[in-house]
Image (cartoon, rainbow, N blue to C red):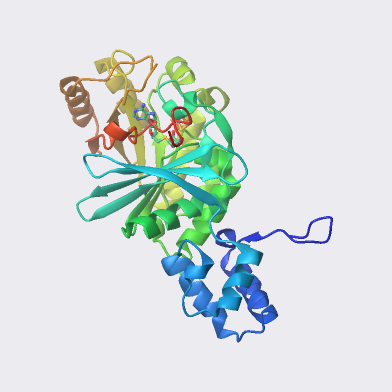
């Protein structure tokens, strides 16, 4: 990108769409006086193996590697540390280039599945009352390159390629809509990362027009809607964005999502003992979503320091689940919490207490 002093800033290679990549790579290769087939070699390295530096791209002449290094940024995120849980879940912490905030991602192995849980923002501005990310502050949107870099660095560092991607790390994906959509394009393009859109889930508290746009642009991407309460007053309190985008409007967009894509939505519901887990809550929930093709994913509240809620006991969670199963035709599951011992479980990612110690 040209700067005012006539010099150019390095381009973020990972956030180029397929054509942009071809143009940028072709002109870099030409400038270096190299033959055109080097573009395909670079492409192979970038999207299939993504080494940690250009210098590791064997087969490319050293002079070209050095020129690429001057022109392009390969990894915008700096690795900070990673933590391995007893259950195999692994949490990664990254530093952003431009400031000091930390970003987190989680790898969750489960049988044949390897799920990467990816962040879209540094912290989260929504500030749900049960979520450590919300309490940790908000330092800004991630660029598409930073979103994609979490995937390619985890893949490179673990050699466990993802079978599934979930946008359930830090941040509200639909509040970083441009970054999200660009990242989804590059991740799903068969000429680039080529990850099947059906294996990607975007989780949101719900912004109606952006849900509609997501349905149009990425009809195969799975939608998860964080519900948590159906009563307006309670949802306003738990999920403050509900004040601006009330649930009724969000659910209308979710119905349209099904009509547009034919894909069921997953409703996520964090169980907060004594707050949203009574029989009446189950009945209200069932009435609200009865007409929507959906599955419900219950998540026991994962506690964190200073949280104003208790951890639910298994028996009461099962009772809530069973009640919903009686009331609704769709699937109701209770999600097993993973990686709690490394603060890697849902809602435990936080900007606080982190960084190399
Ligand atoms: N901002 C998006 C995606 C990130 S949060 C969203 O809210 O949907 C991913 C999931 O973790 C959401 O369903 C959220 O409700 C859940 N979550 C947040 N805090 C939690 C906690 N303390 N315990 C259990 N789940 C939590
Ligand atoms: Fe943000 Fe999601 Fe946490 Fe709410 S639950 S504060 S929207 S990350």
Residue drawn at 35 percent across, 40 percent down? 266
Can residue 291 be seen here? no
Can residue 60 be seen here? yes
The residue most toward the left is: 315
Q: Quadrant of residue 344?
A: top left
Image quadrant in which the N terminus is located? bottom right
Residue drawn at 41 percent across, 18 percent down? 231
Residue drawn at 67 percent across, 60 percent down? 10
Q: Quadrant of residue 106?
A: top left
User: Image height check: is 111 above or below 239?
Assistant: below
User: Image height check: is 39 above or below 75?
Assistant: below
* 208 left or right of 71 in image: left
* 178 left or right of 253 in image: right
Residue drawn at 37 percent across, 44 percent down? 82
Q: State the residue in front, 52 or 191.
A: 52
Q: State the residue in front, 27 or 67.
A: 67
User: Image height check: is 282 above or below 183?
Assistant: above
Percent of width and height locating residue 254? 45, 40
The residue most toward the front is: 357
Counting the numbered discs, the total is: 0
Report ligand 1 position as a quadrant.
top left
């Amino acid at each position: 990108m040209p700067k005012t002093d006539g010099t150019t800033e390095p381009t973020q290679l990972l956030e180029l769409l397929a054509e942009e990549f071809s143009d940028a790579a072709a002109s870099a290769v030409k400038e270096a006086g190299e033959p055109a087939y080097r573009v395909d070699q670079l492409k192979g390295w970038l999207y299939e193996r993504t080494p940690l530096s250009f210098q590791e791209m064997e087969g490319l002449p050293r002079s070209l590697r050095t020129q690429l290094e001057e022109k392009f940024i390969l990894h915008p995120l700096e690795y900070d540390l990673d933590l391995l849980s007893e259950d195999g879940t692994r949490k990664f912490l990254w530093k952003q280039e431009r400031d000091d905030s930390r970003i987190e991602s989680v790898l969750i192995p489960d049988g044949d599945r390897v799920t990467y849980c990816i962040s879209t923002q540094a912290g989260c501005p929504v500030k749900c009352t049960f979520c450590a990310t919300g309490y940790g502050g908000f330092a800004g949107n991630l660029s598409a390159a930073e979103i994609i870099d979490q995937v390619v660095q985890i893949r490179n560092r673990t050699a466990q390629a993802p079978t599934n991607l979930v946008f359930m790390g830090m941040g509200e994906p639909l509040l970083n809509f441009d970054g999200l959509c660009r990242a989804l394009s590059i991740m799903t393009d068969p000429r680039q990362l080529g990850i099947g859109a059906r294996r990607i889930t975007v989780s949101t508290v719900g912004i109606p027009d952006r849900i509609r746009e997501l349905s149009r642009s990425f009809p195969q991407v799975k939608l998860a809607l964080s519900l948590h309460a159906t009563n307006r007053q309670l949802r306003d309190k738990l999920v403050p964005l509900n004040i601006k985008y009330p649930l009724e409007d969000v659910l209308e967009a979710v119905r349209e999502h099904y009509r547009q894509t034919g894909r069921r939505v997953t409703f996520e519901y964090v169980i907060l003992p004594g707050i949203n887990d009574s029989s009446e809550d189950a009945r209200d929930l069932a009435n609200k979503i009865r007409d929507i093709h959906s599955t419900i994913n219950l998540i026991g509240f994962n506690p964190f320091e200073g949280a104003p809620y208790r951890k639910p006991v298994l028996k009461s969670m099962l009772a809530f689940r069973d009640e919903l199963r009686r009331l609704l035709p769709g699937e109701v599951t209770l999600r097993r919490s993973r990686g709690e011992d490394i603060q890697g479980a849902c809602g435990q990612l936080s900007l606080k207490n982190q960084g190399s110690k």
